Amino acid sequence: MRLVLTNANLIDCIDPGVRSECSVSVEDGRIVKVLDGGRSPSLDGATVVDLNGGYLLPGLWDAHVHLEHPRTPDATAAELTVQYAYNAARGLTEAGVVGLRTGGTPDFIDVALRDSFNSGQHVGPRIFAGGWFLTTTAGHFLTSGAALECDGADGFVSAVRDQIRSGVDHIKLNLTGGVMGPSWDRHWHSFFLPEELEAAFAIACQRGYPVMAHAASPQAVKDALRLGAHSVEHGYIMDDECIELFLEKDAWYVPTLGITHLTRDQATTSWEKEWAEERGLPSDLAERADAAADEHRKWFRRALDAGVKMALGSDLRPPNQAVNMEMGLWVKDGASTWQTLVAATRSAAELCGVGDDLGTVEAGKLADLIVVRDNPLDDIDNLRKLALVFKEGRLVADHREEAK
């Protein structure tokens, strides 16, 4: 199958800015030619889509996802599978989210969904699956249904091996507590004994599996980086040594700003206010988020200014709202629209190990593409004005009639 997209304003996520009067040719799911300056591509035998000046760019990614929405603690694995598949598919078709990296999913539902979507059996985004997240007894977010409690070095080694056997792409380790949890689950609390921490990282690294490290305090961030974490999630509290270690180890930071920023008192846009109202966060947890927000914001900006590798992950739900919410927070906290867009496309694909195939618009890449009506570099919320979504050159969502 040959597809030609014409009359595009192209944001390729390689070079800052917009290239006008572009065309993109796709064959067998891959981009084969990108032309600009009004140069005409060959249209012989092609399906031609005139974008009428729409903004063409790579599909969006969310590098920290939990797919449950609404929260249904008593749901069966079968019920959750249906819910997760629906939420993931809506993320693709309603928000242009072409890639998801999961940060905790029970019963390896994310592995099954990954394989189903990859096979073309069902329409959905690319999933990079982590299975259960591993924590300790009395560890983090046990009410999520996605936590696997382990104790002792042998317990963690056994759990990591079971994750590998079950087909995960990465290992999620929760080194600390978090903002959302009971009184004994606080983000400055470290959960692992040194021997547990060292054993868990050692077996994951020995087997070549990247570690996604939930770490919210300076010591935990430094422990994770020194032991070989591929990415650190959250980093609510850090210090200058953390930033130095990120750069030294060439590790990724996924800040998940929405966890501390999206309370009723902090919401400023209509979308944030509506989301916060629907979320209905209990007052004690909202107070914890509000208290953590300024410090979180400070270290996000320090990491950004220092040139730490950063990818966008929301830790919010549902996926058809989460990426846009998180992107708005990046810009509000001082990132440029370009930095934010790259974090949600090229950088997120690189974090997931598929930067050679995805995340930019260039010849040789898979054609996971979106079209929006207005320029997101002018206003990041223009990504909400979604027109078209393509996965490997196949049109999976068409919202053009909604704009009329």
Image (tube, rainbow, N blue to C red):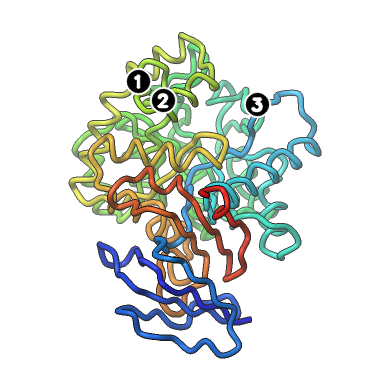
Tag 2 near tag 1, CB within 8 Å: yes
* Residue 114 image offset from top left, x and y in percent: 66, 55
Q: Quadrant of residue 109?
A: top right
Q: Disc 2 on helix, strand or loop? A: loop
Q: Quadrant of the N terminus?
A: bottom right
Q: Which of labels 3 and 1 is toward the front?
A: 1
Kindly identify the residue that appears in the image at 38 percent across and 42 percent down.
381
**Residue with the mark numbered 1:** 266
Kindly identify the residue that appears in the image at 28 percent across and 35 percent down.
332
Query: Is residue 283 in view?
Result: yes
* Residue 188 image offset from top left, x and y in percent: 37, 23
Categorize mark 1 by other alpha carbons within 10 Å: few (<14), some (14-19), many (20+).
some
**Residue with the mark numbered 3:** 71
Ranked by sequence position, the earlier of labels 3 and 2 is: 3
Ranked by sequence position, the earlier of labels 3 and 1 is: 3
Marks 3 and 1 sit apart, C-alpha to C-alpha, by: 23 Å
Residue type beneath disc 3 = Arg
